[in-house]
Image (cartoon, helix red, strand yellow):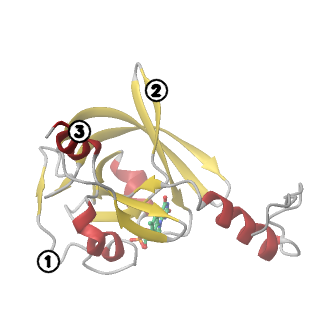
Amino acid sequence: MTSEWTELGADAGQASQSSVSERAFRDVMGRFATGVSVITTVGQDGTPVGMTVSSLSSVSLDPPLLLWSLRLSAPSLPTFRQAGKFAVNILPSDQEHLCRQFAQPAADKFRGVAYSRDDDGLPLLDGAVAQIVCSTWRRYPGGDHEIFLGRVRAVRAWDHDPLVYYRGRLSGLRSSADADDDASS
Ligand SMILES: Cc1cc2nc3c(=O)[nH]c(=O)nc-3n(C[C@H](O)[C@H](O)[C@H](O)COP(=O)(O)O)c2cc1C
């Protein structure tokens, strides 16, 4: 992409324009570095469900709210709608394989994954940087995605280095806690 402005007009996203505009939008948003989470929930029969998500964002402190968006065509959408609750598992730098495993539809995405369950049956991944348990507060239409607004019920965190997603690539980030330790030694 050049530094010239690319116009995304009112008809951006229509069939005639979508290839150029969608690519430009994805390219520019890919320059917003994010963490990576696996957001999990549980089916009525107890089946664990999870998917890789980078659209997580903090919304409100009082009450504590966060949001993420889920593609309307994703197979896991009906389960997230029905469950009314979900858990955010923020991935550490050494769990790139989980990012990939949970980013593809599969009958048993949890095969070989170390996890426990909270009292409501929500899957909590071992080794996460943080786990955030939410009830679904509201759901909103968001174009080809649905926006889930979660009311935060419980949190816990560790000092593992986080996984970072930037321009379509994954990398680890050394945590500032480590950097502070180095600086003082
Ligand atoms: C780094 C990364 C971030 C992603 N973020 C999202 C996201 O925020 N929302 C979304 O709907 N899909 C996102 N995806 C794609 C889903 O993980 C993927 O479509 C997954 O297969 C959905 O689960 P399901 O097929 O079991 O429904 C992301 C994929 C990757 C690799």
Snapshot quadrant of residue 152: top left
- Residue 62 versus residue 170: which sits nearer the camera? 170
Residue most toward the top?
62
| Residue bearing mark 3 | 180
Q: From mark 2 to mark 3, how far is it between C-alphas?
A: 29 Å
| Residue bearing mark 2 | 60
Snapshot quadrant of residue 72: bottom right
Question: With respect to residue 61, does 93 lie above or below?
Answer: below
Q: From mark 2 to mark 1, how far is it between C-alphas?
A: 35 Å
Q: Residue at x 13, y 40 (%)?
A: 185
Residue 75 in picture, x, y percent from top left: 44, 71
Number of the front mark, 1 or 3: 3
Q: Is residue 182 left or right of residue 61?
A: left
| Residue bearing mark 1 | 112
Snapshot quadrant of residue 26: bottom right
Number of the front mark, 2 or 3: 3
Q: Residue at x 38, y 64 (%)?
A: 52
Tag 1: amino acid: Gly
Under tag 1, what secondary structure?
loop
Under tag 2, what secondary structure?
strand
Tag 2: amino acid: Ser
- Residue 54 versus residue 182: which sits nearer the camera? 182
Q: Is residue 72 left or right of residue 116?
A: right
Q: Residues within 10 Å of mark 3 (few under 14, many from 20)?
A: few
Tag 3: amino acid: Asp
**Mark sitting earlier along the chain (2/3):** 2
**Mark sitting earlier along the chain (2/1):** 2
Residue 4 in picture, x, y percent from top left: 85, 61
